[in-house]
């Protein structure tokens, strides 16, 4: 008799990602030339980021089951954000659970969460910084994240509420981070599948109280917003939003590639952007070029919103002699002699 359908689903999702990683590992050139014995490169190490919640525990169990069959080393890392009493005890328990699954190495990393961008954004930034450090310390080929289709739907709705454009609607990528470090095997699986997999395997899970705290935007969306949408529109909203994310990502990738190619054609010999040539481009392509130029000049990408780019765009499409536009990072955009100058100060 085979495994429970939920367990089979999470294992299949992880197996596909591990196969991809093995293919990339064998194609990549060796960092050090092989000895004359032509010994194969060592097997890659894959880490799972685990909070102890159902999604990440299901992911950890699937990784522990699948990795030995493929000759992949598997470890784990849990991040202690220090935001709740006893968080260090919870982190120690997660470490123990991961080791009981057979994962090695396993790390617990304590971080200090700042305030920039709000509590949720600050915690996320601290978490990814810790995961990056852990991956680099161990030489991991990838870090697996337990985001599900439900998380994707929430991310799309949050992007829609911000009015940040099609890239925001594209949600989370299956592969992201420097060198494709982060992999999300569960984006096509729902949250209940992960929880069911934990239940039938008798895996203990920890439910973060922040996930039910209405003080957090994502929590309100999860417990109030999405249920209201499903009540009004019927079942299938989560699946539809996840499909929207993939379609939006495809469109955004194509437009980004177009903008990257077009940018060289709208600069003069000195490298300045020519307003007349920018004006001739489709708005979606032109604004991507403006955003790239602002970031290159020093504007922080996370603080550069659609309204900033729209103001800069009006220097091209609605020029009436207006003054400079101040952007985040002390970057200034101004029109001079038919050229758009974007630089700090």
Image (cartoon, helix red, strand yellow):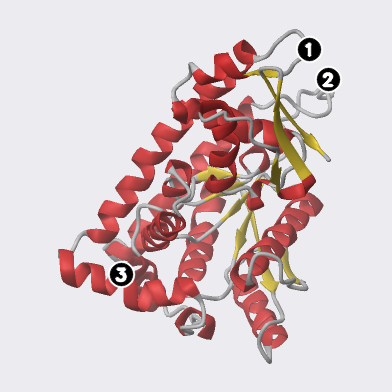
Label 3 sits on residue = 226
Q: CA distance from mark 2 to mark 3?
A: 60 Å
Q: Is disc 3 placed on a helix, strand or loop?
A: helix
Q: Nearer the viewer, residue 318 or 223?
A: 318
SS at badge 1: loop
Name above or below for residue 345 compared with residue 263. below
- Residue depicted at 73% across the width and 58% down the height: 129
Q: Residue 273 is drawn in which quadrant? A: top right
Dot 2 alpha-carbon crowd within 10 angstroms: few under 14, some 14 to 19, many 20 or more: few
Query: Which residue lies most toward the top here?
Result: 269
Q: Nearer the viewer, mark 2 or mark 1?
A: 1
- Return the x and y of residue 284 as percentages of the image width and height: 46, 30
Residue 28: image location, x then y, percent = 67, 27
In the depicted structure, whether residue 94 falls above or below residue 323? below
Q: Nearer the viewer, residue 172 or 181?
A: 172
Disc 1 designates what residue?
A: 270
Question: Tag on residue 61?
Answer: none
Of the two numbered discs 1 and 3 on the same chain, state the one appearing first in sequence: 3
Q: Position of residue 312 (x, y in %)?
A: 60, 36
Residue 122 vs residue 21: left or right?
right
Residue 131: x %, y % from top left: 70, 58
Q: Quadrant of residue 114?
A: bottom right
């Amino acid at each position: 008799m085979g495994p429970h359908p939920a367990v089979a689903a999470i294992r299949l999702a992880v197996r596909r990602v591990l196969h991809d990683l093995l293919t990339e590992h064998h194609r990549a050139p060796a960092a050090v030339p092989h000895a004359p014995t032509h010994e194969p490169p060592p097997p890659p190490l894959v880490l799972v980021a685990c909070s102890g919640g159902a999604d990440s525990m299901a992911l950890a169990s699937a990784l522990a089951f699948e990795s030995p069959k493929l000759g992949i080393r598997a470890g784990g890392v849990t991040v202690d954000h220090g935001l709740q009493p006893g968080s260090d005890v919870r982190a120690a328990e997660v470490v123990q659970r991961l080791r009981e699954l057979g994962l090695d190495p396993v790390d617990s990393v304590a971080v200090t969460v700042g305030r920039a961008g709000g509590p949720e954004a600050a915690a996320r930034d601290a978490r990814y910084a810790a995961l990056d450090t852990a991956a680099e310390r161990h030489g991991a080929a990838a870090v697996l994240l337990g985001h599900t289709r439900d998380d994707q739907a929430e991310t799309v709705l949050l992007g829609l509420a911000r009015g940040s454009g099609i890239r925001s609607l594209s949600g989370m990528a299956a592969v992201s981070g420097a060198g494709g470090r982060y992999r999300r095997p569960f984006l096509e699986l729902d949250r209940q599948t992960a929880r069911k997999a934990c239940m039938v395997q008798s895996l203990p899970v920890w439910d973060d109280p922040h996930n039910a705290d209405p003080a957090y935007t994502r929590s309100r969306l999860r417990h109030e917003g999405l249920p209201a949408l499903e009540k009004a529109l019927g079942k299938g909203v989560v699946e539809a939003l996840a499909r929207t994310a993939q379609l939006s990502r495809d469109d955004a990738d194509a437009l980004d590639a177009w903008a990257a190619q077009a940018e060289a054609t709208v600069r003069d010999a000195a490298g300045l952007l020519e307003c007349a040539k920018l004006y001739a481009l489709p708005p979606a392509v032109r604004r991507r070029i403006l955003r790239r130029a602002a970031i290159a000049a020093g504007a922080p990408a996370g603080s550069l919103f659609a309204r900033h780019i729209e103001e800069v765009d009006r220097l091209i499409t609605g020029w009436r002699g207006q003054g400079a536009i101040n952007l985040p990072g002390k970057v200034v955009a101004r029109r001079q002699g038919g050229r758009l100058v974007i630089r700090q100060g």
